[in-house]
Amino acid sequence: MRLERIRLFASVCFMVAVPIASCAQAVPAEKANEARIDRLLHQMTLEEKMNLIRGGVEPESEYQGQAGYLPGVPRLHIPSLRFADGPPGVLTRVPSQAETATMGVAATFSLHDAEQNGVVIGREARSLGIDVVLQPFINIDRDLTFARGYNTLGEDPFLTGKMGAAEIRGAQSQGVMAQAKHYVGYDTDSYNVFIDQQTLHEVYVAPFEEAVRAGVSSIMCSYNRLNGPFACGNDDTLKTILRGQIGFRGFVTSDWGAVHSVQFINHGLDMEMPGEVPADSPFAAFMHTFFRTATVEGGAPRALNADDLAGILGGAIPEEPRKAGLDLGAFPRDADPKTMNESLKDGSITEATITQAARRVLYEIDRFGYLDGKQKHNVTPQDIEANAAVIEKTAEDAAVLLKNDDHTLPLKPEDLADLVLIGPTAGQVAAIGTFGERSPGLPERQVGPLAALQKLAPNAKIVYAVDDDMTGTPVPASLLSHDGQPGLLRTETNGKKSVDPVLDFTQTNHSALPPNSAITWTGELAVPADGDYWLYLQAIGTRGRLLIDGKELGRTGATKGTVHGDIQHSSQDNGLPTTDGLDNVRRAIQLTRGSHKLSVEISGDTSQAPAQIRLNWMTPTARQTNHLAALTAARSARTAVVFLWTRDKPSFILPGEQNRLVEEIAAVNPNTIVVLNTSQAIAMPWLPKVKAVLEMWWPGDEGGWATAKTLLGQNNPAGRLPFTWAKQLSDYPATDPAHPERSAKGVDGKTTFSEGVLVGYRWFDDRKIDPLFAFGEGLSYTHFEYSDMKATRSPDGGATVSIRIKNTGRVAGDEVPQVYLEAPEKRPAGVQFAERKLVAFDRLTLQPNESKEVTLRIEPRQFQYWSTSTNAWVLPTGSRTLKAGSSSRDLKLEATVN
């Protein structure tokens, strides 16, 4: 889902104040050898053309567990392509570094940081043998209940477009294709979306237009219907807007399973993914291959296994609400069984249409030099240190200081002399938050905030209280038996039986099992008392499944053929791995006192790594003991820093008892500081009772260092909120109970974005709703003064704004000036305008008492609106007011342009 091109590249670099270095990357030029493309297409058979527009199955000996594979045409030396998921990072069977989550990248308000993250993504992809990275994710964060909202770059289309375009330039500078997603209207969990044309152009298409301008190679169309047709078979969005109005020349790929008719190719789709699906994949029963020209022989595909799919998606961990079963009916199912073979015979699709689609793919293959050997499919060592430097810098730049009463932060020597850190994400860095379609991270790189503080402030006296122990302790041998005998009965696939006193086979205790072990342990668990028990199935190098009393309680998320890395990654099922680097399937279950049947199964995960498996738990008594220990530590310390986390489940609420934890800590320690590891707004009922709140997002592998440096003042926070932080969920337009049509459930099966262009802060401004924290807001350890704003019209119809900013504080820091355009005084009839909208931003560093004049350029498009009567961009008459400041609600200066 991307936008315009290299002929506009130079102007793009000057539309927002952009550091020169961010435009210095060698992005592939927007040109290809048309004569060579014509010659190759002329030599191809029909099936060879299909192999450029239909996904295939990579040979198992070469497959890297990536999302997709395009076979290419070996006879004509046209290489295959590998497609890998993100954002952020790159997901394959080889673990790779975890970058700062996308919302954190957006919070930097730095195009340089965004581009450098793109460079890291491109560099990782090259190392891992990947050609196409399925990112950036440039949908709009309009609905906090949207399951993928955390993956966005925030609520503002201008910020999203600019940051996404910068990331594209960075990734493609490494010789890797970027694929912007998901075009378009994929901003809700609804699959049936309606958006008016003005809003569609100005809000939801706008980031994709920026992507095209940045030279994006390809765009992924989304699952949902939009104004009737599916997005992957939508003439209006794909042909009229994307090809016609925006001028996109690259290829359009379906999201995986988003094709529901072979006729989509006649409506603007170029490539079907995943295309052919391995017979042993859980998706084989779920996704139909439409772009098939051959007659398929053999039996029916395997039956749909809901347990497999539920395992892939992951279950609820103990702190989260118990989820209902997987709703397979919500996903659009195929209605038209006709394939390409039949459609070519009846003439409803022509080979010329197939050739045109293949041409677009071949154009990008040539443009990126893949026909000339510039492609790389071998896996080589990753540039760990160079990537780590970018990840840490981004995490530092993303830090948003939301509250800082009495200048509580940074920590003072007296704080460090008597400090307690509380919470599991104090001991371990919340690198990724939630697994999803992103790089899994490298546990060996992850240093928690506690250890980082101890390293950076070696004389500090720090106590650590975990409160919620996510690693737990092994279920003791005294509680495990089988057939009245001690221990669990081990049964191997060859029939060999033996007894193990405990289930604890890890490298930590030097007892890991051989690779590809397939073993079942059975027996009984003696529960000492009635209660809510938290059982942890911990594994790496293997797949595992846990059953209690004959019912499955949990399983590891990796399943062969599910294009999410294929092997078991350590962060897959809990967000945090165990403290010794195992994946952690954590489940809660009510158990009565007495004996309960227990079964654990493991099987190979194709990694060829030693199989590690352990059964840990946290009893009700142990959890209560840990909680009381945290309160005791807080009561006796001068300063308490409480670390809070969420995987965005549930929406707008911290999971578990974390709100109660903060309330209780603040009640016994008046110097309580909160560090958040979230990706969306959450309710903070305890906010008046704490001294400071620092949002660190999901900061990536190096986030522990970034957090410690920010707490110590070695990094001055200057991140800004890329969304509006409401006081209550109902304040947002998509979750306003007065407008059920906007919700994912919608009305009569239809979700209508009836708020129009009033997304995010625009809605709050229009309805005069006070947010808890405004879009663009963020505090600093210093202070800045704005003055001398000037604005002049540019010859191209845009404008230039200059502002002088001075650091009036005692420490160096970054400031993020933002320029907003007010609605015209005379509004054309039938046209919707926001009270104000973001049209420019920058980020600059100032030393104490230093001042600089900042120049920001505003594009002509920002002054225009989309006219539904003329189907064109129109400039309203009259003068316009521009306001500048440090957030959407802190606008200190204004100027007028005619």
Image (cartoon, grey):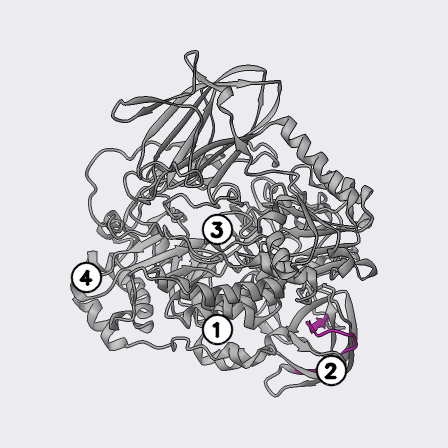
The Cα atoms of the two marked residues, 2 and 3, are separated by: 41 Å
* Residue 379 x/y as whole percent: 31, 59
Residue under label 1, please give it. 213
Judged from the image, the secondary structure of the residue bearing numbered disc 4 is: helix
Judged from the image, the secondary structure of the residue bearing numbered disc 3 is: helix
Q: Kindly report which numbered mark, 1 or 4, lies closer to the viewer in this rendering.
A: 4
Identity of the amino acid at label 3? Pro
Q: Which residues are magenta?
A: 800-823
Identity of the amino acid at label 1? Arg
Judged from the image, the secondary structure of the residue bearing numbered disc 1 is: helix
Q: Kindly report which numbered mark, 2 or 1, lies closer to the viewer in this rendering.
A: 2
Identity of the amino acid at label 2? Glu
| Mark 2 / mark 3, whichever is N-terminal | 3
Q: 521 and 267: which one is in front? A: 521
| Mark 1 / mark 4, whichever is N-terminal | 4
Residue under label 2, please give it. 850
Residue under label 4, please give it. 74
Q: 702 and 190: which one is in front? A: 702
Q: Is residue 573 left or right of residue 353?
A: right
The Cα atoms of the two marked residues, 1 and 3, are separated by: 37 Å
Q: Are marks 2 and 3 in contact (CB under 8 Å)?
A: no
The Cα atoms of the two marked residues, 2 and 1, are separated by: 35 Å
* Residue 877 x/y as whole percent: 70, 78
Give the quarter of the image for residue 321: top right
Residue in view at x 72 percent, y 44 percent: 738
